[in-house]
Amino acid sequence: MTPRRFASVDALRGLTVAAMLLVNDPGDWGHVYAPLLHSEWHGCTPTDLVFPFFLFIVGVSIALGIAPQVETGADRRGLRSAVLLRAARIVGLGLLLHLLAWWWLDKEHYRPWGVLQRIGLCFGFAGLVAIHLRERAQWALLFALLAGYGALLAWGGSYAPWENLASRVDTALLGALNYQYDPTTGRGHDPEGLLSTLPAIATALLGLRAGDWLRRGQWQRLCGAGFFALAAGALWSLWLPFNKNLWTPSYVLWTGGWAMLTLAAFHFLIDRRGWPALGRSFGVNAIAAYAGSALMVYAFAAWGWWEPIYRIGFAGWMTPRFGPYLPSLAFALAFVAFWWLVVRWMDKRSWYVKI
């Protein structure tokens, strides 16, 4: 059985990857419009939606690709091996990219955790859940992850930067290898650390359930669940605020609710009404766009090209006319446009990078 492919999912994945590139690559980090920055700690900006949207789509893709094979009696051992192998490759790619960043840019600091590492772990876990657990057990596990992680954070005694349980676990495990590390206090923190990966898995499981509704044509249920998740997340945030760094349970539900409603809208407009699947080229070559753009950034920074390109091509003539923020955004948009041309060219030739 060939799994059905939804153009809406490719489009949503692609626009999410494009948003990743946009918020990760401004011309000048000192001049970025507020909606394109992450919250400093508590809160949820539009930028804070990007990564959970991608993890949500990981779950949706598992529901569309792996779950139908389970239902038709495919060999579970073979599926399990394929899931674990792909998860390991995604994690390995993340480690390799960080190795190159360490080699080219910062030979005193190697960061083991990262975005691809978290994606790989979430994909592997959600894939195994899709293979071995039925719907009711999947929901039970999702709620257990949220409730258990919320209880762990409360037991840790603080939600403050550096002092919360997730940061303390990351400090104990990796010390100075964390994304942030204060040598004077010996405290570290990583927004993609180990403990906060537990609720990130819950985000992927939300996508898994949403993808099941999508392939069964239960569009209304997808919409209703989205509104319910938004309300539940907003209510939970009164006690435990939205926080991307800690990936709090309220943040899981809030971002998951928006992801469900966005998926429902894309499905209605693209799959049902025939609107063009904008972003598809990014969506079918997400790994090529993300990894390739990271390599480009590392190379430009290592070779000293980034600053002169930005100064000559953007800031030098735009800043006197428009101020410093617009050229920084224009550079990020140009960066996204360049990679859109790359993946569009690849798509026209049916070249797809998969790991």
Image: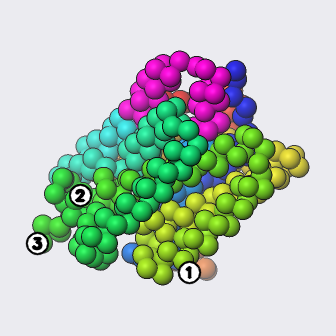
Q: Which residue corresponds to the image point at 37% horizontal and 61% vertical from the top-left? A: 149
Q: Which residues are magenta?
A: 62-90
- 265 relative to 64 in the view: left or right: right
Mark 3 element type: loop
Of pointers 1 and 2, the one earlier in the residue sequence: 2
Judging from the image, the colouring scheme is rainbow
Q: Amino acid at mark 3?
A: Thr
Q: CA distance from mark 3 to mark 2?
A: 17 Å
Of pointers 3 and 1, the one earlier in the residue sequence: 3
Q: Is residue 77 magenta?
A: yes
Q: Residues within 10 Å of mark 3 (few under 14, many from 20)?
A: few
Q: CA distance from mark 1 to mark 2?
A: 40 Å
User: Number of labelled discs?
Assistant: 3
Q: Which residue corresponds to the image point at 81% horizontal and 48% vertical from the top-left? A: 270
Q: Amino acid at mark 1?
A: Gly
Residue 219 numbered mark, or none: none
Q: On screen, 98 above or below 200?
A: above
Residue ID for mark 2:
170
